[in-house]
Amino acid sequence: MNLTDWLKPGLKIKRWVALGVLGIFLVSMGVYPIISFLLGEKRLTSHAFMMLFVGALFVGIAVKRGILSILTILDIPGEGTSYRSRIDKKLYDKRILMRGPKIVVVGGGTGLSVLLRGIKKYTLNITAIVTVADDGGGSGKLREDLGMLPPGDIRNCILALADTEPIMEQLLQYRFTEGSLKGQSFGNLLIAAMNGISDNFEEAIGKINDVLAVTGKVLPVTTEDITLYGKLKNGKVIKGESQIPIKVKEYESEIDQVFIKPDHVKPLKEAVEAIQNADVVILGPGSLYTSVIPNLLVRDIAEAIKKTSALRVYVANVMTQPGETDDYGVWKHLEAIFSHIKEQVVDYVFVNNEAVPLEVLEKYKKDGASPVVLNPEDQERIAKAGIKIKEGKFLEVKKQYIRHDTDKLSEQIIKLALEEKYATDKIRILDYYYFHEKLKKLSRI
């Protein structure tokens, strides 16, 4: 093991130390009101037990993962052969993944986080650039109450890329069902707390990335407070991301365009640099007008995508979204992007061609959704625009919900990156052959 390999687990120890310190802080915050209650000084609330439980959980995870990291440095096996084999495999896999393509994914909502879970199996060089236009649900309430940026989409992306125990993910996704916190997720509250002890939202997200050992980076597209507006074809203007699909249905009028106020916001410098240096920039999947396009309305992000030498990929949604993309085919999705960014900024479009099971399709039809299809007219228009189409069986159904099969989709995107970027670059051609050989094996990690 060389010095570089030796240092990497050492850096990870800092993450577990940070998590342990956070856990100790939460334990102390939970113990204090309990002691005060026993002394008859104050009333006891359920929040004290919650902080005590969460703090103890954080400390336990930090101790366990910290010991594993120390064993990695010392090259000492644990009980039996399990620790040694797990550590060796993890280090070997990470050495491969560190040589993977540089992928930037731009969007928000469930679609983005689902795709990230697939991409991280093939490369550690991931940057997720996430919209901050959300104003509904728990995120909207925190935005209104605390004046912070909405954490919901960012939380989902962090969890998708985090190296966490299953119980930790369940905890961070847990939503309170009673009291003043009803409907709020614990992960949102953790981000809000981190924001409270940080100088700004960007720093808070950076700390969360470190604490949860995130693969790559999750970045808000901007740290400025923005509001999304939708102009309908009947001329009405709707304020607020969450209100746009509702009003589309109410007025029975399609979206003409969306815009943000203020319109001269600055993106994170790190986000622009990631796009400039990427091998692949992926737009979507996700809500077209409320998750993908809002990022492109941040001008420097749009300019970076226009000028980047990266392959620019659009992942078409499997289903239309009621109140947003009713009756949209693949071309109409692309057309909406181009009309907002004022340029054709897609080189490849990935489209699902697998049929949706009838029993699931009927459920979606009742809600007004239908499959996003690639008809002959769309194929002709896309070809004329110089965009290449990649079709495949990218459909997955879980618990009667339709999602992209991220393993298949991610594998095809990575293959495209290797073939188009690595194999034509003499400096990286050895990486291409080495990484391509491991691709199938990595897909089963």
Image: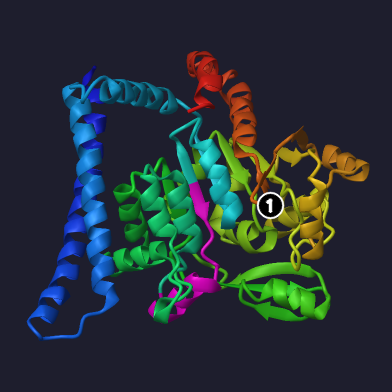
Residue 230 showing in the rendered view: no
Residue occupying the point 85% across, 59% down:
327
Answer with left or right where residue 395 lies relative to residue 436: right
Q: Residue furthest left?
A: 39
Residue occupying the point 77% across, 69% down:
255
Residue type at mark 1: give it.
Answer: Gln
Quarter holding residue 280 = top right
Could you say where residue 272 lies in the image, as x and y percent from the top left? 49, 49
Q: Nearer the viewer, residue 43 or 320?
A: 43
Could you say where residue 70 lies in the image, as x and y percent from the top left? 18, 32
Determine whether 326 is above or below 5 in the image. Answer: below
Residue 360 showing in the rendered view: yes
Could you say where residue 251 lies in the image, as x and y percent from the top left? 81, 80
SS class of the residue under badge 1? loop
Determine whether 331 is above or below 266 in the image. Answer: above
Could you say where residue 24 lies in the image, as x and y percent from the top left? 16, 58
Which residue is identified by label 1? 400
Span highlighted in magenta in the image: 128-147
Answer with left or right where residue 74 lies relative to residue 398: left
- The crowding category of the residue bearing disc 1, from other C-alpha atoms within 10 Å (few below 14, some 14 to 19, many at least 20), is few
Determine whether 270 is above or below 427 in the image. Answer: below
Answer with left or right where residue 283 lies relative to residue 375: left
Residue occupying the point 74% across, 61% down:
321
